[in-house]
Structure formats: C-alpha cells, structure tokens
Amino acid sequence: MISAMWKSLDRYILKEIASPFAIGLTVYTFTLLINNIMLLSHTLVAKAASTATILTILLYLLPDLLAFTIPMSTLMGVLAGFSRMSSDSETIALKTMGIHNRRLLRPVMLFCLSTWLLSSLLIMFLAPEANFRLNRLLTRVSVSRAVSTIKPRTFYREFPFITLYFSNIDSASGAWENVFLYSLKSGDTDSVILSPSGRFVHSQQDDKSFLLLRDARVHNFKRDKPEETYSLTHYNLLKEDVSSRVEMKFARKSHQLVFPELLERKQQKPDDILLGMEFHNKFALPFSCIIFGVLGLSLGLSTQKGGKISGFIISLLIIFIYYTISTTARSLILKESLPPGLGMWTANIFLVVIGLLLFRLTSRERALPRIFSRKPSAAGNPRKKTAPVMVLKIPFARPRLLKRIDHYVSRRILLTFLMTYVSLMLVFFIIGIVELIDDVVDNGIPFHYTLKYVIYNAPSVSAFTIPVSLLTAVLLSYSWMSKNNEITAVQISGTSLHRLALPAVWIGVFFSLAAFAIQERVTPGANQQAEETLNIIHKRDMPTQKEREKNWIEGRNNTFYFYNHMNQRTRVAHQFNMLKLDADFRMLERVFARKAAWTGTNQLRLEDGFRRRFQDGSPSTFSAFTKTELPVPEGRDFFFQKVAYTRHMNIRELKNYIRYLKDNRSDTQRFVAELFQKYAFPLSSLIMVLIAIPFSFMMGSKGTLYGIGIAVGISMIFWGITGMFNSLGTAALLSPALSAFAPLILFAALTVGMFLQVRT
C-alpha cells in the first residue's frame, strides 16, 4: 500500500511538472519562431516555394530550437509545478506526512534525466545535421523559383553572373516579351542575349531551372579584344541554364558538426578554440537540465504565493542569469583568459553551487527569502515596524462617468500586461544574444555589440510582443475574474459583459496609438542603428553603400545603362555600358568604356572604350576611342536613388520615396504595399484585445496555463496569416490596401461571431 502511495506521489508530481513544461516549451519555441513565421510566409509567396519545402524548412529549424528551449522549459516546469504546490500548501501537507525533500527529488530527477537525454540527442546529432541541411536548402530556395514571380521592367540579378530583364508578359500565353539577358558566366567573355519571347521553366525531376528563349540573338566578345573576338549567333530556341543549384561545397562550421565529426575534427586540430567550445557545449547545455531541476525544486518549495505564474517569471530571471554568465565566459575564452573546458562549464558550476545550497536550506526547513509573498504583519509586535515596501501605482484619470469596476479591470489588465511584456522581452534579449554569439565568436567582435544590437532592436521586437502581451493579459485577467466568481457577481449586479469589456477595448485603443507613435518616431532610427551594429557583427559592407546607386537603368527609347561600380566620392563609373535597341528589340548601338565621369548634368566623359553600331541587328561599324563624350538625356540624377529601406522610414518618408520612384518610372508595388502595412500594423494591438475578450469569457475558469496556451495559438495563427497577406501584397498578387487590412478584418469578423455566442 505504501509502495502504491509512493508511485501515486511520483505520478502526481510528474503531472504537475509536465503541464508547465509543455506550456514553457511551446512559449519559448514560438518566441524563437515568431520572426521565422513571417519569413516563411514571405518565402511561400514571394519565392513560389511549395508547401512541402516550407514544412521541410520548419522541420530543419526545430531541432536547433528545441535543443535550446528544452533546458529552459525544464526549469519552468519544475519551478512552476512546485510553486503551485507550495502556494496551495500541498508541500506543507507532504512534510506533515513525513515526506522529506529528498523524496521529492526522485521524480524531479527522473523527469530531468529524460529531458537531458533528449537535449543531448538533439544537440549532438539532430541539430547540427538539420542546421547544415537548412543552410543548403535555403541557398537553393532563395533563387530556384523566385524568378517565376519577377515583374516586368525590372532587373533581376539573383542568378550568379546573370542579369535578366523583360518588358511585358503576354496575357494569353504568359510568355515574356522582349527579353534581355546579360551574362558573365564565361569569365572574360561578355554576352548579351536578346529575344522577342521567352519563359522560365523549372524541372521538378532534377531541380534545375532554365530560360527558354525563342528567336534569340547572342552577342559575344572578349573584353580585352572586343573587335577581333566579336561573334553574333542566332538560335531558333535557346535553352539557358540558370539553375540556382550551383554545385558548391558547403564547409560545415563547428556548430554544424555531428558529434563523431566533431571528435575527428578536434583530434586533427586539438588547439582550435572554437572546436573546444563546441565540444564542451554539447555536454554543458544538456546537463543544465539536471541543474535546473535541483534549482527549480529548491525555489519552488520556498515560493509561498504566486503559483505557476510566479514560477514562470522566476525561471526567466534564472535563465537570463545563466546565459549572461555563459556569454561572458565565451568572451573570456576568445580572449584566452579561460580555457574552453572551464569557460563553457562556468554557468553550470555557478548554478550547481547555488542549487545545492538552496536545496540544503530547504531540506533543513530554514526560511528562504519569499518571492511574490506578502510581508508579515507587524500587529503582533507594536515595537517593530514593517519595512517600507515598493508599491507600483498606475495613475488613472477618474472622470465621473468612469465606474469603479473600470479601474479594477484596467489595473488588473495593465499589471498582467506589464508582467507578460517584460517576460517576453527578456526572452527576446536572451535569444538575440544567443543567436549572435556564434558570429561574435567566429568574427572576433567585442561582446558589447550584441548588447547594443538587442537594445536597438527592442522597438521592432515590441511591435510583436505588445499585441501578444495584451492578448495574454486580457485572457488571464478575465479568466482570473471568472475563477473567483467576479464575472458572475458583475452580471448579477446588472452589468453586461459588453460593459465589462469596455476597459480592455480602451486599453487596446491606447496601445494601438502608442504603437503607431513608436513606429513613426522611434523604430526607423533604431532599426538603422540595429542594422549597422549587425553589419559590424557579421563583418559585411553597409547595405546603404550598395543601394545608393542604380547599377542597371532603363532609359528612354529602349536604352539601357549598366556598370560594375561607381566611386561615391568622385562619381566615376567603372566598366560602363550603354545599349540602344530598336522597336523590334534588336541591337542598334553598343558603347563600352572602362571609366565614365560626369562633366555636366546630361554629359558623360568616356575613357578607353569602343562604339559599335548595328544594321538590322548585325554589326556594321566599330570604332575604338581613348576619350569621348556621351550625351545622356535622362540626366545625372537618374543614376542615383535614395536608400530603399522602408524599415528606416516613417510614413511621410515612405510617401516621398514612392513619389520619387514614380517620377523615375520605377516599380512601386512593394513600397505601396508596405505603406499600407504601416497604417494597418499598429491596429494589431486593438485586434488582439478584441479577439481575447470573447475567448476569455468562453474558456471560463480553466486556469493560467490554459490561457497562455490559447494566447500562443492565436498569436501564431494571426502572425502567420498577416505574413501571408503581406507577401501577397508585396508580390502584386493582391491589392496593397486589402493585403494590409484583410487579416485585421478577418479577425474582427471572428470576434463579432464569437461575441454572438457568448451569453452577456
């Protein structure tokens, strides 16, 4: 009988741990995936990738994410489970039955050993291989099918050594009209291919892509001998291979090596610091599951008030401390101040000492500092005064018409929002640091740049976390009120649920306005600073320097200009070309110069080049020059454009940029879609509140973790649909206004339908 009681106790504790563990795993994994959901939606539409490809990408992402989130969720599961038991005095009841803390450690260790084995399997074998295959798959997807959605009168340069352009699409056949192809695939040979008709073909069998060009004329010459080596070839049907699956030998990085490969590489390079760090990390990170179990048990037993939600907050603080120590130790390893073995285990050693000390104290039943508990009353001892307690006061305007219930509901929602928002932001900061640490290590960048990046990235992250936090806060607040029968009391008093929901609606309106203000005044500058910091971490050129000039320009009357590089200070273009075509898209004139400099608003001085004229598409005359002048009717300003990064712009700046593009006859579809998205996106806070209200009334008193699970599910669906519609607008498959506002309209309609099902 006693044996059955022990088994029942083990099952009960494991059940208490498993529930918050599952919720924590879902929340943490979703937080890691939230940006990838938007990117995957964009890939599905803009890259024309199949659903199977998207699911494969998601599958390859999960092992690496789970290896990171399982230890975090283990801590949350143990801590939240025992916090709930302590808050309900169940641990006191167990002590009165003679059950010691060491007995409670047995089911905890059983659970932690399971998560340790799972995390070890992931980080040693599945995650490295999945990470490697993901990089290879993304390289293929980034180009293989994107050309199928390219718009007319734009230069497509995603193919290696090839630039593609076509003027129109035949509405009946879908074929491209007036195709221009410039190729440097042959090294020193310059190739221009002109065709009146063509199309893109992708072979599913061998995963290769081709351009089929009819009646194609190929102009070839070697750049060092343009006159002697010129050739003109005519094809009735030309099949040009533009497959994105360029055979590249991908070198596995240290974190992409499965454990046997890592051992072999480490034997070859025993002094390699990066390999040493990765070797110890494959043991240290999974072992943290066991450490978190002991620490979670000790802290959970000492938590008198707060329940599972307090366990969630405390677990985040511990995780933040753990990864702060880990990243600091990594920095010291790179500076050769610590050996890799000691450095990678420093955080574990620190938490082992703290965990064992706390477990020893709780086992001796010594009082620990109480977390989320009330201060003891001083009434029993008049000489003693209670210590001052910091009280968070939220100011509220109190107009006469505002009832006391509004203050009560608003205060509860705002306090829950603050707690949820801080928790999510803390998770994002941890994730941001961990995701960048490999690049910081590989490139030898000072660690403070990672902190700088996460701070500048905070406004963009807040755009996602504020709606999710509001959704969670409204769900939990009304759920708690229902659990305490406060909803019933309000209804008995004659107040409808519509009236009870009014404070939440006003809070949603306030945060939508605040999100709009942050988007317009804070986010553009912060995004620019974050991107510059990220470029330093990745050791890459600033994108703004690449996009200040238009390397490919469509001029007037079928005239094309292109060059390799332009000096920003002197405005001198190198490897300058001008092509002039006739009405049938055949070559009329070709001008090439090694250097081209502006001598006036509409005049270029060309140096060291040639001019070739054509008659009926065939070459007629050739003349070389040392220096000559070339009139450019389009003017100098036509060759330069503003930086096209909408994330650095507010609405006013984006409108000016769209106007600028229209004046220069450039495509504006993507930017118009993003303009409407800037109008629509701040309203997501209000929509999240509206959708949370009927959900909270319908789920009743099913508990905190149930509410968090509902919030995560709704958020994933909302961001997935939003990303899908935004991509449809960007790809010109849907009107810009509809693509931006359709998700909001759909969820608002869902809210109305659900409200009709609620008894108010």
Image (cartoon, rainbow, N blue to C red):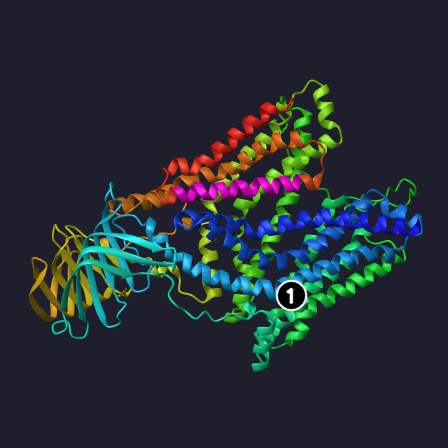
Q: Is residue 299 left or right of residue 46?
A: right
Residue at left offset 62%, top offset 27%: 501
Given residues 569 and 301, the one toward you in this image is 301
> Circle 1 is placed at which residue position?
326
In this view of the protein, can residue 402 be seen by the observer? no
Q: Counting other residues with Cα less than 10 Å from the Cα at mark 1, is it few (<14), some (14-19), or many (20 or more)? A: some
Label the magenta part by its dominant secondary structure: helix
Find out whether residue 711 is within the magenta segment.
yes
Estimate the x, y position of residue 45 in percent, counting from the top left. 41, 47
Q: Is residue 330 left or right of residue 10?
A: left
Kind of residue sitting beneath label 1:
Ser
Q: Is 459 in the magenta?
A: no
Answer with left or right where residue 236 lies relative to residue 760.
left
- The structure residue drawn at horizontal position 40% and vertical position 39%, both measured from the top left corner, is 676
User: Quarter of the image containing the C terminus?
Assistant: top right
Q: Which residues are magenta?
A: 707-728
Q: Residue at x 44, y 35 (%)?
A: 741
The residue located at (33%, 53%) in the rendering is 147
Residue occupying the far front of the picture? 205
Give residue 274's position: percent from left, percent from top. 57, 74
Q: Nearer the viewer, residue 754 or 241?
A: 241
The quadrant in which residue 483 appears is top right
Q: Is residue 377 above or below residue 217?
A: above
Residue 350, percent from left and from top: 73, 66
The answer to whether 254 is drawn above or below residue 547 in the figure is below
- In the picture, measured across the screen, residue 357 lies left or right of residue 456, that is right
Given residues 486 and 5, the one toward you in this image is: 5
The reply to whether residue 85 is visible in this rendering is yes
Q: Position of residue 683 (x, y in %)?
A: 50, 36
Q: Establish if 54 lies above or below 619.
A: above
